[in-house]
Amino acid sequence: METRHPEFVSAPIAPDAFAMEYNKVRDRLPQHVRKPLDVSRDEVLEICKAHGVDHPTKLGREGAQPTLQTLERVARLLEDIAYIFERKEIPPGYKDWEVEIPEGDEFTEAVEKDGKVFFSTVDKSCEFSRIFDSSGLVKNYDQGWMARGDLNIVNGKPACVINDVSKSFVFFDGKRIGPPEGYKSVRLIRTEHRKLIYTAKNHESDKDIIYVDGEPYGSSEGYLEVSHVIPVGEELAIAVKERSGGNMAIYLGDRLIAGDKEGYESVREMKVINGDLAFIAKDTVGRFVIVYDGVVQKMSNQDFFHLKEIDGQPFWVEKKAKGGDELFVDGESYGMYSDFLRILETNKGMVIVVTKAENPKRLFLLQEGRSIGKEEGYLRMPSPRMISVGDEVIIASCQEPGSSWVIESTSGAHFYSCEKCHLLKAIDDTHFIVIAEEDGKVVQRTFDIEHLPYQGEVNT
């Protein structure tokens, strides 16, 4: 967890430190690499400023103590800067690529983290699976099939679950983790954590065991139910049922947050907000509660959902008995909506997605009380459906089943059309990537909202 220093005042960045070293080289570089270079530089400077130092080499030695995740992030940013300085090219995470899907295979899913991309396919007989990286390098798994949610990236390497009719296997970077006979069932926990986390049932038991890097975490005998597992700083928060007839207990590291006697009937959602644990739960008398940093934010007989962080504060939605959904930010009402679906934080305020009972049902976008995007709404949006890039809101949608996906902004700029859109992610304030299927290939395309049309460079 990030160390807090409320009395600390950030030191200004010295003009003769990191920024001066950077500026000497920048002006000699090609124009097209300067924007991604500036984005990486600015983030390094912001991290340095927040920790009271004027150069990244002083992080961890002077000023406020950074977390390991912060140091890893700075290291990655400095690698990108060095790559651009040395090669006068954009880093691989910005470059586009195309990889053919083998004949007879079907695409399963794509995952991306810090510029690394992996995607999976399964043959139509479900007898074997493959994992590809963006260069086309493939690892084959003949133990069975992969479903959506069975692929993750841990420390830049692929982690996956391979299933057959009677057992499941866990692999990390192509090597099997766990017993040779596999598990009865496995659930991969997708997090930003640097460790491989999953829950599994052994063949001789119906209890769920939590594993971290292949070793049991918490009870080595397992739990009757594992509802949630999420990293909170360097610790794990878990919601588990430990005994028959007991309630859900919540642990943060070794600390018991709520025991099974005084605990909750169910834990609906668990999130990290501004570095602290937050969750939605239903208590033993049927009331719903929002808990953030150990403090009950609200209690109600009405259901809560869609817990997330907005501007460093908890956001949630309360389902009203008479219909409608009321939105809350840090306990303050943000308005009532008839059919709330999701929310996106942007530079120009929050974008709220609602549905209207038309035939077929369509999605509409609202910002600051007015409609944005297409007047007729949107029929379908894939995950993550929409992203914020600078001052633009980018949407992937299609207007009818089987039609092409269109990637466009709510202001009307058209960027791309493809057969299927699988991933949409902002890189910085001007760039975003699309991972899509087209013509029997999985492709990555990079777009610059300030320069239309498509300006990407294919990585061959």
Image: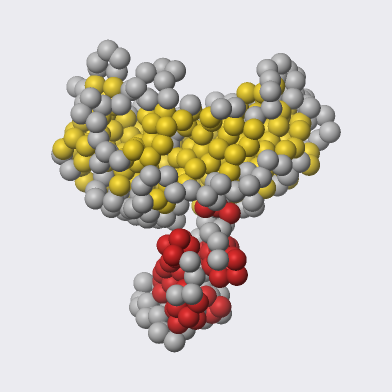
Residue 208 in sight here: no
The residue closer to the viewer here, 110 or 297, is 110
When the figure is inspected, residue 252 is found, relative to residue 303, above or below; the finding is: below
Residue furthest to the top in view is: 359
- Provide residue 174's location: percent of width, then percent of height: 76, 41
The residue closer to the viewer here, 436 or 289, is 436
The residue closer to the viewer here, 231 or 91, is 91
Q: Is residue 338 left or right of residue 151?
A: left
Q: Residue at x 59, y 39 (%)?
A: 98
Residue furthest to the bottom in view is: 16
| The quarter of the displayed image where residue 283 is located | top left
- Provide residue 157's location: percent of width, then percent of height: 67, 47
The type of colouring in the image is secondary structure
Residue furthest to the right in view is: 180
Q: Residue at x 25, y 35 (%)?
A: 373
Q: Residue at x 35, y 41 (%)?
A: 394
Residue 31 in sight here: yes
When the figure is inspected, residue 15 is found, relative to residue 180, above or below; the finding is: below
Q: Is residue 38 left or right of residue 459?
A: left
| The quarter of the displayed image where residue 344 is located | top left
- Provide residue 442's location: percent of width, then percent of height: 58, 34
Q: Residue at x 62, y 41 (%)?
A: 118
- Provide residue 54's location: percent of width, then percent of height: 45, 80
When the figure is inspected, residue 287 is found, relative to residue 16, above or below; the finding is: above
How many numbered circles are shown?
Answer: 0
